[in-house]
Image (spheres, grey):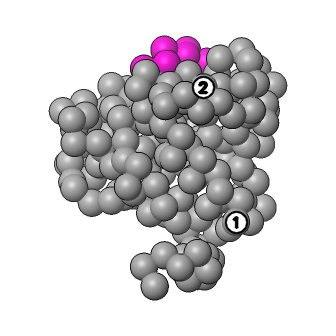
Amino acid sequence: MSRLAVFFAQGYEEIEALTVIDICRRGGLEADMVSVTGEREVTSSHGITVKTDKKFEEADFGEYDMLVLPGGMPGTKNLEAHEGLMAQVDEFYKNGKYIGAICAAPSIFGHRGILQGKRACSYPSFESHLEGAEVTAGPVEIAGNVITSRGMGTAIDFGLAIVSVLCGDEKAEELAKGIVYRA
């Protein structure tokens, strides 16, 4: 069974983070909520506090098949400021393991040179940060081991894309039907 980590920083976008967790767990994936704050409880950009499964320092990155960065402000900036997380993102990308980001968070990949020559999408006001990418307005872009998505309204598409790459198209289609998505 594949396993992924979704990272929570102060000011994360709750729909983007929690929808991915929900969809992935429904799809049979092990999905850990990982705090980068040093605390288990993390508060979203809209004042919703969640208790994560573990702190960054407790994560065993050898167990993960994918890292996911939700957007939100200042959540995206707080994720990008976490040096340990950025080192893991770079390592996963370099080793061909999946990395994903939604909304403002794909800007992090752009800043790190990860999107060069790849199709990518993000929240419209962050498209200029997708350095070197072929920017699209699609709900999700999968370019090799990099998955990007546009925002809160595409969170289900993003979650289903993750299930598709880690569990197969059939599982993602079955899950979409089960949640009455685009019925």
> In the rendered structure, does residue 82 fall within the stretch colored magenta?
yes
Q: Amino acid at mark 1?
A: Arg
Front disc: 2 or 1: 2
Q: Is residue 90 above or below residue 5?
A: above
**Where, by quadrant of the figure, is residue 131 drawn?**
top left
Decide if residue 82 is in sight here: yes
Residue that label 1 marks:
26
Q: Is residue 19 above or below residue 79?
A: below
The boundaries of the magenta stretch are 76-85
| Residue 33 lies within the magenta run | no
Q: Residue at x 44, y 36 (%)?
A: 71
- How crowded pointer 2 is (Cα within 10 Å; few <14, some 14-19, many 20+) is rated as some
By secondary structure, the bulk of the magenta-drawn segment is best described as helix
**Residue 182: image location, x then y, percent:** 42, 79
Quadrant in the rendering for residue 49: top right
Front residue of 93 and 123? 123
User: Residue under circle 2?
Assistant: 43
Q: What's the amino acid at mark 2?
A: Thr
